[in-house]
Image: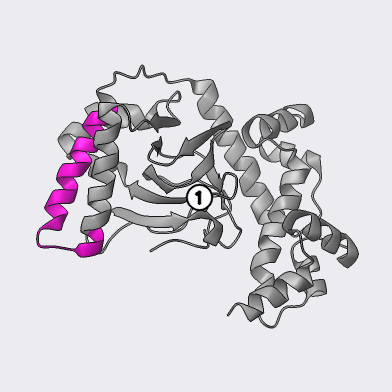
Amino acid sequence: MQIKNFMVDQSLKELTEHRTVVLPIACYETTINQNIHGYIPLHWHDEIQFVLILNGEAIFQVNEEKLVVREGNGLFINSGCLHMAEEKNQSDCVYICLNVSPHFVLSQELYSTYVSPYIQATNLPYIYINANEPWGKNILDSIININQWIQQKSPYYEFDITIQLTCIWKNLIINGFPLEYDQTEMLKSQRMKQMLNWIHLHYAEKIRLDDIARAGQLSRSECCRYFKRMLKTTPLNYVMDYRIQKSVLLLQQAESNVTDVAYQVGFNSTSYFIDKFRRAMNMTPLAYKKYKMDDR
């Protein structure tokens, strides 16, 4: 079942529990433009993620890097990495999303040797999965199989899934990726999440650049460099975008009104909120609210 509204905590960690009834995995088809925001917002989770594009093409951002994944190909996103997705060229992008707890990939005896080093490596935020490569095709075929088995729930399908996960992981690591463990990169990731965590706790209040920088134990200039490199925006523009995201959810509540929503998400002027909302959503907050009410 597609997740249309990504619920995240203050650090952007996704709150969805990625599991079937008995297995610590989740596999479902996602249509990007059906998400409540029209795209998959920035988030992270402890689970590793595999993506297979079924239709169209998508632009993924993983940490500070962006890449295009086209129909038939896929992507591995490592545990704990910030990521988001949007469809490219209104292509009605649909993809299978497979989230797996790292501890479920292999047995406990093999985990420390063949899983832990890969999810802790700082140079493997993602791996592009090319369907034209034998190892890539094997992974993508396994994703399709797992998706079908979860939907059909045929007898002993849990056994089949565990076998396929082993095959997926073996095909991923047989390429001999060099593993690096950069303490500086680990610290950067930690500080970025600290700043995002602070913003998501205080977005409804008056926020200054100094406040955000202090949350990450950085200077103002370093704070700006972090946001520009990792999120391709400024800290205060990120705050603005996040406030608009929160307002979208509030406007869908029947009892809400534009002025109240504006102040609830941190704007001190209704007209300013309307202007920023229109720029971001290509319609006014009231028009968006009416559109969503009529759509029910």
Count of marks, rendered view: 1
Please identify the quadrant where the C terminus is shown: bottom right
The image quarter in which residue 224 lies: top right
Is 163 above or below relative to 258? Answer: above
Q: List the single residue furthest toward the left.
A: 155
In this rendered view, identify the residue nearer to me: 116 or 74.
74
Q: Is residue 192 left or right of residue 139?
A: right
Please identify the quadrant where the N terminus is shown: bottom left
Is 77 above or below relative to 122? Answer: below
Task: Please tell me whether residue 10 belongs to the stretch shown in magenta.
Answer: no
Q: Is residue 167 left or right of residue 49?
A: left
Image coordinates for residue 168, horizontal then vertical, percent = 24, 37
Q: Is residue 199 left or right of residue 25?
A: right
In this rendered view, identify the residue nearer to me: 247 or 138.
138
Q: Which residue is mark 1?
A: 13
Mark 1 is surrounded, within 10 Å at the Cα level, by few (under 14), some (14 to 19) or many (20 or more) other residues, namely many
The image quarter in which residue 233 lies: top right
In this rendered view, identify the residue nearer to me: 168 or 109.
168
Q: Which residues are magenta?
A: 150-172
Name which residue lies at 39% across and 56% down: 29
- The reply to whether residue 120 is in sight is yes
- The reply to whether residue 23 is in sight is no
Amino acid type at image mark 1? Lys
Q: What secondary structure prevails in the magenta region?
A: helix
The image quarter in which residue 64 lies: top right
In this rendered view, identify the residue nearer to me: 264 or 155.
155
Image coordinates for residue 237, horizontal then vertical, percent = 76, 45
Name which residue lies at 24% across and 35% down: 138
